[in-house]
Amino acid sequence: MLRNGAAGGGGGPAAGGAAAQRPVRVWCDGCYDMVHYGHSNQLRQARAMGDYLIVGVHTDEEIAKHKGPPVFTQEERYKMVQAIKWVDEIAPGAPYVTTLETLDKYNCDFCVHGDDITLTIDGKDTYEEVKTAGRYRECKRTQGVSTTDLVGRMLLMTKAHHSNIDEDLDYRKHTDNFGKSCRAASFSGAKRVTRWLFPKLPHGGDKAPSLVSPALRPGPCWSCGRSPPGLARHRPGERGPKGHSPWTGVSQFLQTSQKIIQFASGKEPQPGDTIIYVAGAFDLFHIGHVDFLEKVHQLAEKPYIIAGLHFDQEVNRYKGKNYPIMNIHERTLSVLACRYVSEVVIGAPYAVTADLLDHFRVTLVCHGMTEVVPDKDGSDPYEEPKRRGIFQLVDSGSNLTTDLIVQRIIKNRLEFEARNQKKEAKELAVLEAMKRLEEEKH
């Protein structure tokens, strides 16, 4: 039974009895645009329900028809999903509406989706047919992350999502401007701040971009957990205050040791393994990172890749702006979900030191073709592995960077906002219908 090195694998329907003789095949599908640890966690849960996981990924055309323009191309999205270690197989070009015909085509017992709702362009539940047939299972949606939230972080350009950030003047400026902290009570300064952030965008005259559309409003304060006015947390299926959808809204992500254990493989290096160390931000974990790690993985017959993730403040030092878009806890889960990575060092030192190399018994250190920024004292962070003759540059063949992703978002800002607003409007219509049905029962 193939487990892809996933932790906590057993316990699915095929465990024990006659059912163990036949592998349980599970189906998931979705857009998987800007793949993040929320997607990975859904697939992890789905994989635990059976023995073999097939993931259907929609085409660009299907997504544009039902939701709006995707950030990544279908080829990029196919490869990102395939890199998630709980995925056994992908089905490119899966239909947007999940049918019994699709499940039968891939010989799947049932499909799994999160406890939010997915709607077609005309507002119908995409899983209605398989739900009616009893071939639908539900898993828990990962709180604190969504594609909508990540797009919002890029557009709003705040640093409030960073972990352990000091409450300094720079932070207060960002939180006061955008209402990310609990002190802010309104978005009255949004137009002024938007002109400051996007002076070159063609939004015309005094009309600022709609950066505070419902889909992009911030969730609870990252430092205290309180929600801004009108954005208190609520249960799935329950209409949010002031007409916000509970599925499109954003809640606070809280890292736990259990979540890390669930994502980690738990495998120690074995005799004969080549221990390879890579380090970086790995922000918005994307296809460029996957291509790089895949190339590194191919360098040895038995690779054991350790990824060192720098703390948020360190990443911000060498990348500037509001980077990283994802904080250290989120980046940890994103990298752990990758099938090419065996271990993650959380808060790795920027300089690859002799102590680090000796502690992990590293035999090779790799870096991509991106610029290596000097350490705070001006020294080369790879000086020690270079001195030992174990440093190697790896060309992934991909030119995609986190910067380019952000540029894609900003370039298509209005389209993405329209997509998010349309998505929320459909969800609210469904909530109203659910509410009416509930009232009719009583």
Image (cartoon, helix red, strand yellow):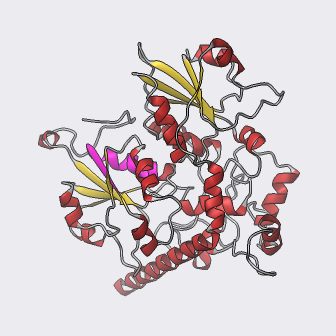
Q: In which quarter of the image is residue 133?
A: bottom left
Region of the chain picked out in magenta, as a range: 39-56
**Which corner quadrant holds the C terminus?**
bottom left
Q: Reply yes or no: does residue 363 show up in magenta.
A: no
Q: Image point 64% across, 40% down: which residue?
A: 281
Q: Is residue 340 above or below residue 133?
A: above
**Which corner quadrant holds the N terminus?**
top left
Q: Quadrant of residue 353?
A: top right
Q: Image point 37% across, 36% down: which residue?
A: 8
Tell me if residue 239 can be seen: no
x and y, in percent, of residue 294 in the image:
46, 35
Q: Quadrant of residue 175?
A: bottom right
x and y, in percent, of residue 262 in the image:
45, 39
Q: Reply yes or no: does residue 52 show up in magenta.
A: yes
Q: Image point 62% across, 14% down: which residue?
A: 389
Direction from residue 308 to residue 303 in the image, left or right? left
Looking at this view, is 6 or 66 the one in front? 66
Q: Image point 23% across, 49% down: which residue?
A: 25
